[in-house]
Structure formats: structure tokens, C-alpha cells
Image (cartoon, coloured by chain):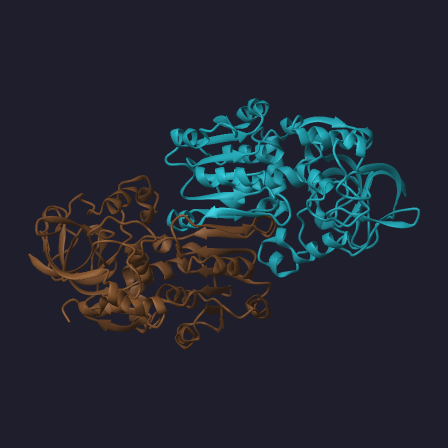
Chain colours: A cyan, B brown
Amino acid sequence: MRMLAAVMYQQGLPTPFAESQPFKIEEVDLEGPVEGEVLVQVMAAGLCHSDLSQVAGLRKRACPVVGGHEGAGIVREVGRGVSRLKVGDHVVMSGAPGCGQCGYCGDDRPNLCETVGVSRAAGTLGTGNRKLSRNGQPINHYSGISSFAEYAVLTPDTLIKVDNDIPLSVAALYGCGVVTGAGAAFNTARVRPGQTVAVIGLGGVGLSAVMAAKIAGASEIIGIDLLDDKFPLALELGCTRTINARNPDVLQFVLDHTRGGVDYVFEVTGNKNAMATAFAITRKGGDVICIGLGAAGATLEYPHTNLVGMQKGLRGTFMGGGNAVGDIQRYVRFYKEGRMPVDKLVSGSMSFDQLNANLDALDRGSVLRQVLLPHG
Amino acid sequence: MRMLAAVMYQQGLPTPFAESQPFKIEEVDLEGPVEGEVLVQVMAAGLCHSDLSQVAGLRKRACPVVGGHEGAGIVREVGRGVSRLKVGDHVVMSGAPGCGQCGYCGDDRPNLCETVGVSRAAGTLGTGNRKLSRNGQPINHYSGISSFAEYAVLTPDTLIKVDNDIPLSVAALYGCGVVTGAGAAFNTARVRPGQTVAVIGLGGVGLSAVMAAKIAGASEIIGIDLLDDKFPLALELGCTRTINARNPDVLQFVLDHTRGGVDYVFEVTGNKNAMATAFAITRKGGDVICIGLGAAGATLEYPHTNLVGMQKGLRGTFMGGGNAVGDIQRYVRFYKEGRMPVDKLVSGSMSFDQLNANLDALDRGSVLRQVLLPHG
């Protein structure tokens, strides 16, 4: 099949991306699904900060590659041996699948799956295949998803069936942003009623952590960001108060509204200064839940004596730290019950030709979560 | 009452301590117990690496002070209002009590007790009193214990009643070293059967972690230390294998005997290089359990992207991270059942006049746990 897709040939092109055009919108060839593969018509794909990191080259990726690592669509064809999905199913594409067979999957930690890591680094699907090409030259898959395209072939473990009554433009956010932020609160921190939290970085991931902390019964949810215009929505979604990260009194502000700091800080930026703030505002016995990856190879500092004597923790979480299948289905229920209004995270939609310009908007923080609609 | 005690007048005296004599063995006055206090005859007091840190001045302490923060003895007199203990009871003195009333105690985290922290910094008992003096000049208490003395007055929360059939020279180690190391494995890591661990620093605390990991069913317990002569006892107490920390192949050695690293590293030194090793040999999804305090104010580094992407954690633990009362009573049962041979940690005993020289021996790593016997 021939289809439109957003192809990146090299990482590290300069801003503004509207000019350097890291994604070329081109016709590419997509092979149909063989055994253990599924063809999905991509109805919506989220644009995420990790896409910015990919474009900037903060982490090396095999190129050329079709971008996109979260999305939702409709199953159009299933290969032999795929029994769990059928044509017409609505599915979320998730970058946190698991092979179900390795040591980590067997230990209920599928987001650490060893098999997936290997195929991701190689730019293939979990089957080892590359289904994408242009003029006979193979093109890599991005995180086994490549949702910046009209269609995608994926392995069934990356596809989570969801009810047909959730809009696919909303469902598109679940595969990465929502599962990452909400899972950090539900699975990694396991926030309990009455506890206090802070969230540093109020984008789609951070706001998902805010919504989850509210559902979990947190009594104080402090939102922290460099941009004041993120605060109205943060307050609407669950923050009890907000403060600008540049305010020199952030620590005192947190102390004024908590008992010696918060139980959990969700740090979404991976930025060095933000991490220092996060450690400082965590109370004795509390944890910094580290979500933001930051630049590859960056080393950060922390005061070791405080970590030990105050029994603080720095805990990394990735893709929500749980089982994406059960997590996403649970979060879809929360959405339908009105408890997790993920639709509020969608700040707008775009067509292929606006993709590069929207990278700039995301970089400036002037948009939250833009959704690509490949079929308009 | 007049009695013999080891008094430190200033921190930071140079090595060798046998010459600089940081502890002066002197007659001091001890007031009897008032309401909410207990007089204990100290039968044994452990000498611990934290005593070295205190002498070296790595963390400031109020001086003059009678040293010693772990010990065991016999109750000789109880003040009014003390109902839990009676004359003749055998007790362990623990530096990890809790007031039972503050937010942390109410949250089952007594080792983070706020009240205790205040009195410790002030050099008083939890009652706010100083019971020690010399020539009318008040002397401070160390961690509410001050067990380097013939007698001590303490608050009941620092005293844990133990059966009379455990030797007091063994029980003396429970209050700090044993509860810290074993609690790190049982409470903070919660090691499960079949998991793999490494312990960096095979002193009394590290070997307590080794014994606990073995009881918890760990299938691989790798001991790491700078001194090869620590290894025979480590292997006897539960290590499955050992390697010298200076060996350049430590990482490969761990990878050869585990599935991609260990689930938990217990890092007892607080040393920068040891912490880097600890982080490297932790497998995806695993934790470095940080026990060693290191120097006050020291900042350490870690690779942030690995922390997040590999879902590793750095978790501080202090005094075992649990409830010292229940913990110590449980560990005494394990000793009596032959499952936790704490007596093997006692490398020798000493009288007051050998205290300073034994600090040197501890500093060199040539002794494990020396026990002061104030009454010979």
C-alpha cells in the first residue's frame, strides 16, 4: 500500500522547525501484515515532548524513520495467528508493550521488556520486520509505532482495544502521555488519600499525573511550571494551587501548604534545576518520581546525606511503570465516568502540513497536546 | 551518681586516635531518673563507623558529649509514669525511637520522628533534660543514648526489652548496626525470594543486610569490599560470592552471575565511587538502597536518563526504615533460632582505656564490631 507519512532523515536540525522541516511529508510504501502483525488505519496521533527530543537528537534513533509513538485507530487487517483483535476494533497504540515471555514480563514489569528494547533500538517491529520503505529503501519504525502516517503495521502487543465510544482523537493520548503521567501516580508513587504532591512541568504528562493524584485522593496538589498560562487548566484538572518555577520562594510556598514538604514530586522535565527543586520540596520519607528523561548521558547531582538521613528517594518511572494494557483500559473507564477528562489535554488538531510548525509551538510551550489527524 | 564515662570535648582531632585521644575517660555525674526516664546499667556498648564520623566531625554534634549510640544493659531504676519497663529488665538501647505522637510516628514511620530529631540536635534526652555533668558543667547526650558509660539515663522509647537469654554483648549491636542493615533489606527493599542483591561495605551493617537477604530468600548475595579479609565471614553469613571493590571487572562479575544486574544494592559506605558502582550494577527496575551517610553536605552524581529509562531508584534508608521496637524483637528471635548469628559480628571486647585505640582499628578496617564492656 502507498500512503502519506512523516519521515525524518536526520536528527539535530535547527529551530525553527517550520523552516528546517525535520519531518518530510512523503508517499511511502507499507507492506501488509504477515503472521503476528496488524494493519491499523491511524485516525489520530499525539505530538509529544519526546518527539521534540527525537527531532533534536537528544537520544540517537535509527534514520530514516517514520515518526509518532502514540496514536489511535481502527484495525483494518489482521495477520495469521492474531486472535485477540479483529477488523473494526478501535485500538490505542502504546509504546509500552511487553513480549509476555521475558524475565521482566514474567515479573509483571512489561514496560521493562527486554525483547521490545532490542527491536526498538533496531528500528523494527517486535517481529523483526521493517514494513516501511520508499523507492525500495527501507524506513525504520519509531518505538514500534510510527503513527505519523495514514496507516501503520504493528504487533498486537502494542495495540490495546478500547470501547468505540471514546473519540479516537482523545484515545490517541493514552498510549504515551496519559499512561506515563497517571501511571507515575498510581503505580510508581501509589499516592494514598490525604497525601500531598507537587507536579513540575504541566504538559500532557504532568496534567495526567495531576488528574491521577486527584483520583487517588491527594489533599494537596501543587502545580509548578515556567509558564503562568499553564495554570488555569492545571487548577481545573486538580491542582489545589500553582506557582511559577522562577519564583524564588517555591520552597517556602510548598512548606507553607504542607507538613515539611510534599510526599511525592512528579518531575516531568528532566531539567537539572527542576530536579534540585524537586528534591528540596520533598518531605522526609518522600520520593521524587522522575519522569522527564532530559538529555542522554546527563548526570545530575543530589545531596547524599539528606537522601539517607531523611529517607528520601529518587525513583525513575517509564511509561507509567505498570502494565499498559490494564492501565489504559482503566483510564478509559475513568474518562467515561468523567473523572479523568483527557479531552481537555487536546489543545488542537492538525494536518500533516502543520506538523513541523507544531513542533515549534510545542517547543515554546504555547500548545499542550496537538493531535495529528492523518485523514483530516 | 558518679561514674566512669567517655567524654568528647571537641570533634576533628587527628589520627592516630590512640595519641590524640578524642575520648577522655573521666568520672562524671549522672542525675537519677525523673518522670518519664529510666536508669540503665550499661553492660555492653558497640563501637560503630558512625562513631568514627562523630569523632572526625563529619557531622557537627554538641560538645562536650558522652559518646555511644548503641548498647544493652539492665534496668536499675524507673522514674514515675514509666509502666512498660521494670527493674531487672534486659534492654537494647536504640537510636531510632519515636515519640508516638507526631505525624511521622502516626504514619508508622517512627524513625523519622520529628520530636526525636529536635532533642538529638540539642544534645538532650527526649524529656529535654541533660542528666550528665562534670564539676557542675552540663555534658550532652549523644543520640539520646550515651552508652560509653557505666550507666545511662534514657527515655523509655529508646529502650527495647529483650529476653534475658540473649547475651548483652550481642544484644548491644541491635540498636544501630543490626537494625539498620537488616531493616534495609526487610523494610526498605523488601527483598523477595529469588531476587539478587549486592552489599557494598561488609562491616557490621553490611553483614546484617547479608544475613537479612539470606533469610528473605535471595538467590544471589554478592559481597563487595576493599578488604579481602572481610570475605570469609561474609561468605559464612550468607554471601554467595565476593569480589574486591578495586577489581576493574566488578560490573562484568555481577553481570556474569545475575540477569543484567542485581535487584538491590545495599550501599553502606556513602563513598562516591562506591555509589557509582552501586548504580551501575543495579538491573533495570532495581534500586540502590543507600545506607552509608558519607560526609555532611556531599553531593553525588547519577546518570538521570538511566534512572528514568531503566526505572532504577536511589532510596535512602535510616535506622532500618521501620519500627525499631518490632524489628529488634524479631531479629532477636531470628538470633535465638540460629538464623541470624549476630554474635559473629562481635570481633572483640574492650575496656574504657582501649576505646581510642579501637577507633584506629575500626578506621583501618582491621576489626568488625568491638564491644565496650564498662564493667569489665
What residue is drawn where x is 25% and y is 57%?
B69
Closer to the camera, A48 or B328?
A48
| Residue B198, image x, y percentages | 48, 65
Q: Single out the residue that lies furthest toward the right.
A: A135
Residue nearer the viewer, A350 or A230: A230
Say if B345 sits above or below B70 in the image: below
Q: How many marks?
A: 0
The image quarter containing residue B161 is bottom left
Viewer-closest of A354 and A275:
A275
Which residue is at a point 66% across and 25% down the rendered structure image? A366
Q: Residue furthest left?
A: B1
Residue placed most toward the observer, B35 or B71: B71
Give the quadrant of the C terminus of chain B.
bottom left
Point 43% across, 68% down: residue = B214
Q: Is residue A128 visible?
A: yes
| Image-based side of A221 in relation to B47, left or right | right
Q: Percent position (x, y) of residue B246?
A: 50, 69
Q: Is residue B348 above or below residue A223?
A: below
Measured from the top left, where is residue B14 in percent x and y? 30, 61
Q: Position of residue A118 (x, y in %)?
A: 71, 57
Which quarter of the figure is the N terminus of chain B placed in?
Answer: bottom left
> Can the viewer see residue A322 in this picture?
no
Q: Is residue A298 left or right of residue B61?
A: right
